[in-house]
Amino acid sequence: MADKFRGLVLSQQDKSVQAEFQDLSVDDLPDGDVLVRVDWSTLNYKDGMILNGLGRLVRHYPHVPGVDFAGEVVSSGDGRYAPGDQVILTGWRVGEAHWGGYAQYARVRADWLVPMPDGLDGAHAMAIGTAGFTSMLAVMALEEQGVSPDQDGEILVTGAAGGVGSVAVSILTKLGYRVAASTGRKDTHDYLRGLGAVSIVDRSELEDASKPLLSERWLGAIDSVGSSTLAHVLSEMKYHGVVAACGLAGGPDLPATVIPFLLRGVRLIGIDSVMCPYEKRVSAWDRLAQDLPMVGLDSATTKVALRDILPWGEKILKGQVRGRLLINVQ
Ligand code: NDP
């Protein structure tokens, strides 16, 4: 490998965060037992927050962001990985508390990696990224609660044109569910129908949280919005419906009542991708390799070079990114 490589480095000056591309060397990288050549990364909502210094996610600067990466092992002090292995990293607060994937090399703990599953390559793994991995965890949560495609009713996906939402629509469709996609962007309706949504719900229909119960509408739901949207969705669940709460794009509050839980036995399941245990990670990645149509994923993916990433960090915070962003790091 070359002595120097490129990386995006965040530094803090007078409480504001500055981003600069710098030449780094392996000695600059933090401790870890596996050195990985990072080929691909992604831009998730959380990356947008970190690039813009929001949410106090990063406590120590200088910092290399990028919460996900895929690449090839260059050297390893851990028996589970050898040079040449293809690996994926998502979560574990990499890109927040540890240096992440927006540099051409990363050094990390072997425990944080998963081997590339059969049927996926680095670019597709990162087109999926934390957002798509979270969608799969949400689908698995619905399944674990007994939701199945042969039951009567639709699965609602909120924030459907975003990263978590787009992948969730694709997976659910492939598995045979009838999917209702909720979006605030009219220009994404054809895109969402192309991913398989059978109906489109305007975001504004789901924003009123003033009524504890409304007509039963949804068999299951995958929510990336939170706040009054999640409260509204809870009030529209069918008897014993299941909601997987993934995100807070609309806000972290939940202005709901317990009535849907008490009168309809509605179940609200939290989804955490960051500290998800290893065995579950491996099975979710295997499921993604099997159950996510690559044609749909490709249509949901925009490829961006690492040097062009900064404006995209602002766009994702404004809800202006459609689907997934794949970052070419090399
Ligand atoms: P994106 O920005 O790609 O998607 C979020 C979508 O939410 C937008 O595209 C938009 O969808 C909708 N949205 C945005 N702002 C609002 C608003 N004010 N009110 C209602 N809807 C809104 O982000 P990701 O898909 O990467 O992440 C989605 C959420 O999931 C984020 O909150 C993120 O932090 C969280 N997340 C959680 C994880 C976990 O482990 N639990 C892991 C990954 C992400 P549309 O245009 O279709 O209306």
Image (cartoon, grey):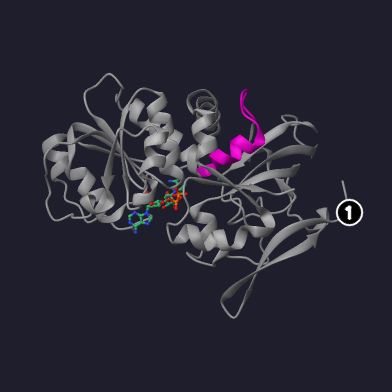
Compared to 51, does 134 lie above or below?
Answer: above
Q: Quadrant of residue 76?
A: top right
Residue 148 to residue 257: above or below? above
Residue farthest along the top direction in this orientation = 150
Whether disc 1's CB lies below 8 Å from ligand 1 is answered no
Q: Is residue 33 left or right of residue 267?
A: right
**Residue 271 in view, yes or no:** no
Q: Give the number of callouts.
A: 1
At label 1, the amino acid type is Asp
Bounds of the magenta segment: 116-130
Residue 122's place in the image compared with 61, above or below, is above
Query: Of helix, strand and loop, which mostly describes the magenta segment?
Result: helix
Q: Nearer the viewer, residue 12 or 205?
A: 205
Residue at horizontal 68 percent and vertical 66 percent from the top = 62
State left or right for residue 228 relative to residue 66: left
User: Whole-percent x and y of residue 77?
Assistant: 78, 37
Q: Is residue 155 above or below residue 22?
A: above
Q: Is residue 127 or residue 2 the one in the foreground?
A: 127
Sort mark 1 into few (<14), some (14-19) or many (20+) by Cα contacts within 10 Å.
few
Horizontally, residue 231 falls left or right of residue 76, namely: left
Where in the figure is residue 322, as x and y percent of width and height? 46, 49
Secondary-structure class at tag 1 = loop
Find out whether residue 129 is within the magenta segment.
Answer: yes
On the image, the x and y values in percent for residue 4 come to: 85, 56
Q: Position of residue 56 (x, y in %)?
A: 50, 65
* Whether residue 241 can be seen here: yes
The answer to whether residue 252 is magenta is: no
**Residue carrying label 1:** 3
At horizontal 74% and vertical 42% (from top left) the residue drawn is 36
In the displayed structure, does residue 128 sit left or right of residue 197?
right
Toward which corner of the image does residue 22 lie, by quadrant? bottom right
